[in-house]
Image (cartoon, helix red, strand yellow):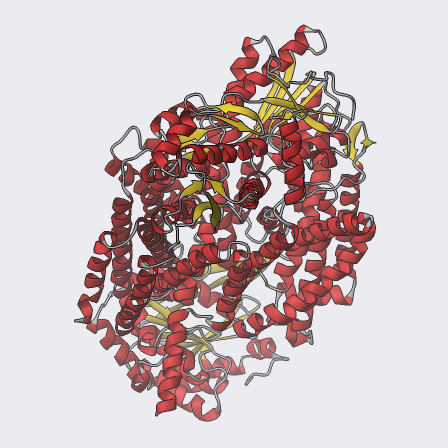
Amino acid sequence: MLTTTLILGLVLGGTYALLALGLTLQYGISRIMNLAYGEMTLAAAFVLVALFQGLGLPPLIGLLVIAPAGYAVGWMLYAVMMRPLVARAGTSGRLEVDSILATFGLLFLIQGLLLLVFGANFTSISYLTHGVNILGVPVALNRLIAFGICLVAGGALVIALTRTRWGLALRAVAQTPNSAPLVGIDVNRVARQGFALGTALAAVGGASIATYQTFSATDGVIFTMKALVIVIMGGVGNVAGALIAGLALGLIETFVATAIDPGLTLAATFTIFLAVLLWRPQGLFGRG
Amino acid sequence: MSLLSIESVTKRFGGLTAVDDVSFTLDAGEIVGLLGPNGSGKTTLINLVSGNLPVSSGRITLAGATLTGRRPDQIARAGVARTFQLVRILPSLTLSENVMIPAVFGAKAHWGAEALAVAQDALKQVGLDDRADMSASRLSYIDQKRLELARALAAEPQVLLLDEWLAGLNPSELAEGIALIRGLTDSGITILMVEHIMEAVRALCPRVIVMNSGQLIADEATETALTDPQVIAAYLGESVDA
Amino acid sequence: MNNFSRRAALRSFALVSTAASMLLTGGVFAADDTVTIGYAIARTGANATGAGITTIPNYELWVKTVNEAGGLAMPDGSKRMIEVVEYDNRSSNEDLVRAIERLASQDKVDLILPPWGTGTNLAVAPLFAKYGYPQLAVTAVTDKAPEFAARWDRSFWMLGGGHDYATGLVDVLAAARDAGTINGKVAVVSVADGFGIDLIKGARPAFEEAGFELVYDESYPLGTSDFAAIMSEAQASGADSFVAFSYPPGSFGMTKTAQAMGYNPAVFYISVGGAFPIYPGIAGGKAEGVMAIGGVDASSDAIKGYFAAHTAAAGNPPDSWASAITYASLEMLEQAVARVGLDHAALAGELSTGTFETVIGAVKLEDNQLRDLWTVGQWQDGSFRAVSPADRAGASDPIIPKPEW
Amino acid sequence: MRRYLPIVGFLVFAAAPFAVSDYGLGLLIGAVTYVTLASAWALFSGHTRYISLATVAFYGTGAYVVAVLNETLPYGLVLIIAALIGALMALLVGLSTLRLAGVYFVIFTFGLAELVRQLITWYEVNVTGTLGRYIFLDVTAREIYWQMLALAAVTIGLTAFIHRHRLGLALRVIGDDEVVAAHAGIPLARTKLLAFVASATILTLAGAIASPRWVYVEPAIVFNSTVSFLTVIMALLGGANRLWGPALGAVPLFFAFEYLSVNLPNTYPIVLGLLFIAVVFVLPDGVLAGIEKLRARWKRGAA
């Protein structure tokens, strides 16, 4: 039983972590509190289904198209919409308010477009649904693939952030945006990259969710919320933290569902989330 | 009888001891310079006195009343006012509102015309009384510094803590600033000022306290301190007149 | 600041007076040669999906069908075209209530069609009653339907209550157990909202009375997207019957999870969503034998014709539970209008006492409720066929155990 | 003369139900509800700049209290209990969260609304076994309107009072710089708590007053996070730190939403989204500040 809980929890946590990676970058590096994050993942999910059903493109190939497209969209969004807000805010705290408002508008805009283009129906595809036996626990292949994507994307990000010059610049901007320019970092460029990369990850997360979960055009806020919870638990801008927090959350939810009461899974999530906020607002794995 | 007394005060941040067992006292009406190289713990000490940071151990008293363990607002109401190393004005308020705040929320709790009068007096002391209704966000840097001083004065404090209040001023502004502080001491207020500008320290403070790496290394007359080998050693590598 | 506030107050009055003129005038419809029918339905928000599947396509199909036939027939034999006034209730009851007030007091439409959902239908019931409009509440499942029908005598409740569906299911399972095809253990999960609670509250005593043992009985919150833990607990419980009182995302998620983990209970029952046309696709073409709430007499010509018309108009077939009843409610309205006209009192009386020919057969309401309901259906040969009540004409025999995925 | 304008205005509004249709009254209720919510929200958040997304946690709780108690207690008492529960909840939340700064506070309040919803759901499912509750109260739409109008008047009156009072100044200082506020002698925790509790009590009461119109109540209906978002947007649009700002944001936005849902039911979210983005870019400090700026420019042009 414990093995089952552990494996199911890890698989679930993997999808959570993947969902949160993009948000932690956008929020940590670009300082954009992106309320439209869930809609962005949803848009990618719809595109994946459209590619699969319309063009017969296998989802794993579709991912290779969607990820760079997400990067491009994020890049443009930042340049057109976020950059003016960042410039206007300067060092004051108003960027928080402005980004909440602007991305709230974006949330409606994307949701409206999705409803218009794809309709209000539940959408789902069947792709690699058969089970694979892991230590005696049957797990759907598509979930395993999503878990693998999470590990690859998350691992690559952690390595890129800790081992490369580019990663150093990103981390510098995340931690001290005001002093980063002093050491010759182009904060605007880094922030744009962070936002674009975050959007690409949101797209990858959404596309992999589309392979195993039923969704509809109004589900975005659920994704945003899960991602937010994990980002806060892991520490803003902390990729490794988001990975660990995502996995932990998956384990906790599975544990609560099996050992206590499935009715309390979401309540447990929010309780832990609020407790972390009060006890360690910098995140479980942040400094300080 | 000393007014402000610092008794074996220590502040640790994790493994770092920023202020290490520091003791000294200030008499009423005294103006004392607090010197030391960057990172020696001066600003931390100011933060401990004003309650911005809690002490790790030790005791601070004002006229016999214990300040340690109390919140900044309680310490402010007890009669301690301060300025900040990086100037902190309130941009969305007018000059007169900026200055009025400690008068309203301080020990005397003035309100209405009375508070306005206190604010106006303080603004006059620093020479900003003609712009009382202007938004503080539109002030120049020197005027922001003046505003901050006026705000500290409007608290009608017993002890004024100045954290590099003269830093960043050009020579003529500096002369003005020194004259302004000297004017204050004449009114009987007690001042502890962190300062890097030796010219100002010489001109204003008969006595200095010198810190290095969190420890108090000298508490003596200014002229003595500035020739003290220990003090000079501490400043080595640092530009004294930076 | 103070000065400014006063100016702002002045300005706000100017603004409000513009708004007020908007309140007082507004759209006036020429009601001579057309029949205006209004509805406030969820185009956006949480209810948009349910409304988009069950309610909106049927309203649109019916209006199109009637208008193509020359309009709505009146008692005098004349025909009047239907003109639709539609608002988005944004899945918010506040907006919905206001929209109904607008339809009734401002637009003064001839008829109002109800919104989608149990809570929404209850929220507007006092308003329908206040303005006298008949309310054909289809997509509302509530055990309190008899009370509501008594409280608001022009309201009609057409989808039964949780108790009906729970006992219908228990009947099917009891017959199978008595035949020796399944054991006496049941694993049941329910979604934690009004619908799930109603069903599980009806099901617990019914199962107990029939001698079943509930070896797993848990609820899960609305918005749960991962069912691996729940399904593996149910699988480990030793029950032959898996019962889920679920909403579409849950129904679909549990199906996929069960397939992935090779969970093959003899009875696999889910609730809302199981009768959706997209379900076989979601089940990867392996829907055969899955039971769900609702059902239609798939072999009847009326249903076949309705499915074909719906597919032609909306691009996809209807769901096999509330859709046909929704359409039937509109046919009832159409026939009642043809008999007594648009007078609300007469219309309500006719709906309450008359007999109507509809896609679900002849309908006669009992105490303003539709009681001839299909409670359990099963996917058989690509159609979702009603299996309970077994003694009703048109019922198919259930296939138990369900073929493996 | 101008001093009496708000009073005259209040009387005009109080008499309005006699002149409008039922739908008109519905619109008035909606508009006044959002004026109340936005003004009450701004009472705490406008000056302190703590963006709270917990509006619906209180608003929904108010409605739920009515749903639970409406059959056992007289209506007036139910309202009082709702207000008390809101105040108590705000006190607990405030004590634990008001030291959270900036975006952490935003997220916490967002999570709080969800937690309250989940806990009530779990409690109802597992303890009382009745998730949906009915509110069959003989409160007419007019009475709801008058109650809400009175609450709006009280909220704006209270805001005006606080603006002129030391508390208002303290809140403004806190919004600009908490460190300075503390060093000027302002007790941070107590000041913030006072404003937060006042704001939350009004929000809860607003939910309690509005609830009889819903008839049927369940957590998914009453804890609809859109309400929190709309409140924030409305207050910020008008100018959250001004007395009439929230009202001036709430009224036009409310009517804009109504217009959109009537005339563009299919593209409503798209237009709404574009509208928001436009507001952020064109009127960053709210309508009132925008008008002020325009006037200043016009004056300069004239001079």
In which quadrant is the C terminus of chain C drawn?
top right
Q: Which of the 4 quarters of the picture holds residue A273?
A: top right
Q: Nearer the viewer, residue C241 or B63?
A: C241
Q: Residue at x 79, y 40 (%)?
A: A127
Q: Choose top left, top right, bottom left or bottom right for residue A113.
A: bottom right
Res. C229 visible in picture: yes
Where does residue C93 sit, x and y in percent of width and height?
43, 43
Residue B92 in view in this figure:
no
User: In the image, is residue C267 above or below residue B232?
Assistant: above
Q: What is the count of numbered marks?
A: 0
Q: Where in the figure is residue D264, as x and y percent of width and height? A: 50, 57
Residue C224 as seen in the image, left or right of residue A278: right
Query: If the image is split into quadrants, where does the N terminus of chain C sit?
Result: bottom left
Of all residues, the one furthest to the front in this rendering is C77
Q: Residue at x 57, y 9 (%)?
A: C210
B234 or D292, which is in the foreground? D292
Q: Is residue B18 above or below residue A212?
A: below
Q: Which is more toward the observer, B167 or A151? A: A151
Choose between D34 and A51: the one closer to the eye.
A51
**Residue C198 placement, left or right of C378:** left
Residue at 58 percent of width and 54 percent of height: A282
Residue D164: percent from left, percent from top = 25, 65
| x and y percentages locating residue B68 in the rendered image | 40, 57
Question: Residue drawn at (71%, 28%), measured in percent from left and top?
Answer: C383
